Image (cartoon, helix red, strand yellow):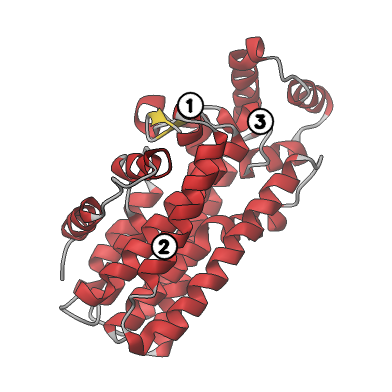
Amino acid sequence: MKSFDEITDIISTEIDKINWSKEPIGLYEPIGYVLSLGGKRIRPAMALMACNLYSDNIQPAVNSALALEIFHNFTLLHDDIMDRADVRRSQPTVHKKWNDNTAILSGDVMQIASYHYMTQTPLNQLKRSLDLFSQTAAEICEGQQYDVEFEQRERVEEDEYLEMIRLKTAVLLGASLQIGSWIGGAGDEDAQLLYDFGINTGLAFQLKDDLLDVYGDEATFGKKIGGDILCNKKTYLLIHALEMAKGKDADDLQRWLAISDEKLSDDKIQALTFLFNKLGVKEICEDKMQFFYGKAIANLEKVSVSDNKKQELRNLAENLMFRKE
């Protein structure tokens, strides 16, 4: 079995081989730029690790893994425009470094490129891999739309939020594992268990992201702390704060949510963080993370390969739970 580091080295090498030095430069240069920023490479790594559970030869899954990574980065270009995010992986976002139109069009090309690589999936797994990839792509758009709509709503229920992050984040992790396992030769039951492992890991992962946006270290998190607070994003923390705040706390929360003056940005972040601490929503979020992490590990335990083969996936789930970036 290959380690996570060995897998990510393979992915980085393959990504570096892709030639984005094409005309028009203004279209392709941003793609090379965003892919050169690195990132965790979680999705392609999961695909290759799942393949490796059943086959020593992971090369047949490499193009599918590249498709998943290119697609993921395409979504980030468009998300950053919608969120007006200035920083990604400690560097200027594409729409900030270039402009919105460039980020939209370069993102479109990345989506097309992702399908080009996915069509190079081994023929015996091509149809269902493409079907799952297309289903997942649509689900991610559904999740993003819910996310946008939630910003305009006064209240969002916990179940609604969890369904949104399942669609926006978790389904791509699940699909990565399932496609990789299919290519490796997994049976249907194991492939479904790995998909479920990805879903539950993804839910825990996104809840951790909510926490890091408030409580992370900006130097390691890779983007500005408090960005979700400033745009009133309905995170798991804010949803529970809105539900739990009473009296003066509720008044203070609503008052700060109504403030959009950039000069008061730091004050708003500080005030909402204070309220989150007072209401104990950090601990509520951490408990929910642990719940999904536990479900993920339970899914993985049922996969019918030896425990030592599954250790790298266990380690990955744990690292995602306790990461600082």
Q: Nearer the viewer, residue 36 or 90?
A: 36
| Residue 323 in view of the camera | no
Q: Nearer the viewer, residue 48 or 208?
A: 48
The mark closer to the camera, 2 or 3, is 2
| Quadrant of the snapshot with the C terminus | top left
Where does the image place residue 169, in percent across and percent down from the top left? 52, 56
Where does the image place residue 12, in percent across and percent down from the top left? 22, 52
Where does the image place residue 297, in percent across and percent down from the top left? 39, 67
Residue occupying image coordinates x 63% and y 26%:
230
* Residue pointed to by mark 3: 231
SS class, disc 3 = loop
- Structural distance between the alpha carbons of marks 3 and 1: 12 Å
Residues tagged 3 and 1 counted as in contact (Cβ below 8 A): no
* Residue pointed to by mark 1: 224
- Structural distance between the alpha carbons of marks 2 and 3: 30 Å
* Residue pointed to by mark 2: 114
Q: Is residue 99 above or below residue 19?
A: above
Q: Looking at the picture, which amino acid does disc 1 mark? A: Lys
Where does the image place residue 309, in percent across and percent down from the top left? 21, 74
All told, the count of numbered labels is 3
Residue 189 figure quarter: bottom left
Using residue 28 as the reference point, say whether residue 96 is left or right of it.
right
Q: Looking at the picture, which amino acid does disc 3 mark? A: Cys
